[in-house]
Image: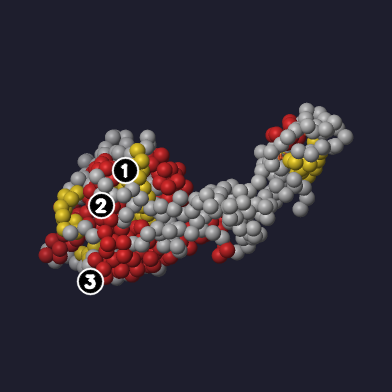
Amino acid sequence: MLLQLKLPSIRLNKEISVEEKKIELNKVDEFPPMPVSLGSMRVNKTSSWRNFRPIIDGEKCIGCGICWKFCPEPAIFPTNPPEVDYDYCKGCGICIANCPVDAITRQDETK
Amino acid sequence: MKTVMNGDFAASYGAMTSDVKFVAAYPITPQTLIVEKLSELVADGELDASFVKVESEHSAMAACIGAQAAGIRTFTATSSQGLLLMCEVLHWAARARLPIVLANVNRAVAPGWSIWADAQDSISQRDTGWMQVYAENNQDVYDSILMAYKIAEDNDVLLPMMVNLDAFFLSHTSEVVDLIDNDKAKEFLPAYDPEYKLDPKNPRAFGALTSPEHYFEFTYKMFEAMEVAKKKITQVGKEFGDIFGRYYDMTESYKIDDAETVLVTFGTIAGTAKESVDRLRKEGKKVGNLKIRVFRPFPAEQIIDALKNAKRVVVIDRDYSYGNEGAFYTEIKGALYDANLRIDTYGMIAGLGGRDVSTTVIKEIVEKAETSEPNKTYFIGVKK
Ligand code: SF4
Ligand code: SF4
């Protein structure tokens, strides 16, 4: 079955200048004074603290788009079957809990 | 320009001379006059600022946080219960490193419902990350606000500052205050221009989730900032003096060089203590006074230096840390211990809920110290 959705994609405003550089804070002197974002999330991935990842089973999937709709990040691409963007998926499990046919399973992350 | 005004108005004019661009405040006795005067100054076009009426002190501080994060200089004022209601957002302002300045009229905490002088309100907010100044007179209130912005906005400090003034003894008492003209003030305190601010052209997320990987360092940076602030407060106090003729520091010593008994005081009690020192010296007693003007950051080095030759250190607290002793007393002892100074100390709790601490009371305190067991806390003037 095909995912029949015309879905908006999220883009950054071109006029906005966001530093497209990788921010790594390894030493206290590199920290800003307060917790503030220092660069674009296009290069600064946000999934480092994920404990498990959702795995979508394309065979079971009926293409309803619920996982895409419910993902709070959003880290699911509306393809058929949907694809998880593991650079941003935080492993909350909302997609797993809401899939009507249990097509998504969890797999522990190992470090 | 010399004029006569009460402490509340001195706070309002302090904010005006500092060219604040945003004021959000909620009235509470005995701070109400500060808010009324500021709204008047804005309405009359004398102060070019937004004046935002809010429904609570929590909202007042929250509004200041938003405005300051957008890169403008803000001011608010409160007292007692109002300061306590702000508690959550006081922490927020400090950890967001927003150099907001707040005037707090030191008033007792209820119940019993009291509008009179007592430092319990600000002392209980000691660990919010705010710098704390305790003013001795109305000129001190006015000058401290101007200096507060200069210190707080320093790029290596970036911490909010609370200027405290005693209820009624300052808030509603008129004294001569020398006002600084705007051009001179601008030279001393340039416009606020922070490196990180809310800006649609360069969007940033502020105060986001911070994992154990990073949170620790942000607290460490506040430790560093407080250390810098110690030097900065002394430096700015001197610079202020060089320009305007009135010098300030974190502490002020009065006749301590040969003093056997040194009183340690803050706020208006410091003024009375100096008068008491003069009177007691006429009776042949070698007494001095150390005023703690800045409580956070804590001026341990200056305190050690001032007290090292004393025989007796008598700390007067207009506050009480329930279950222990006066807050200043604890910290003074800590400083002496660090310097390996084993001096007899006396914790004197006095003046709670606005009870007068007159020269007679201070004389009684000195006599009590001379005749009582050291290293203990005494409540002065309890009806027995
Ligand atoms: S686990 Fe959460 S973040 Fe990851 S894809 Fe599913 S809903 Fe989105
Ligand atoms: S919720 Fe389940 S069935 Fe629906 S699109 Fe997502 S994976 Fe497929």
Q: Nearer the viewer, mark 2 or mark 1?
A: 2
Q: Are marks 3 and 1 on the same chain?
A: yes
The residue labelled by disc 1 is: B79
Q: CA distance from mark 2 to mark 1?
A: 18 Å
Tell me residue B153's x, y (percent).
40, 59
Q: Is residue B41 left or right of residue A56?
A: left
The residue labelled by disc 3 is: B258
Of the residues under marks 3 and 1, which one precedes in the sequence?
Answer: 1
Q: Residue at x 55, y 51 (%)?
A: B203
Q: Is residue B359 visible?
A: no
> Depth check: B263 or B292 in front?
B292
Chain letter of disc 3 in the image: B
Q: Are marks 2 and 1 on the same chain?
A: yes
Q: Is residue B358 above or below residue B250?
A: above
Q: Is residue B310 above or below residue B206?
A: below
Describe the element under mark 3 as helix, strand or loop.
loop
Of the residues under marks 2 and 3, which one precedes in the sequence?
Answer: 2
Q: Which mark is residue B13?
A: 2
Neighbor class of circle 2 (other Cα within 10 Å; few <14, some 14-19, many 20+) is many
Labelled pair 3, 1 in contact (Cβ < 8 Å): no
Q: Nearer the viewer, mark 2 or mark 3?
A: 2
Q: Are marks 2 and 3 on the same chain?
A: yes
* Amino acid beneath label 3: Asp
* Amino acid beneath label 1: Ser
Tell me residue A44's x, y (percent).
66, 54
Q: CA distance from mark 3 to mark 1?
A: 38 Å
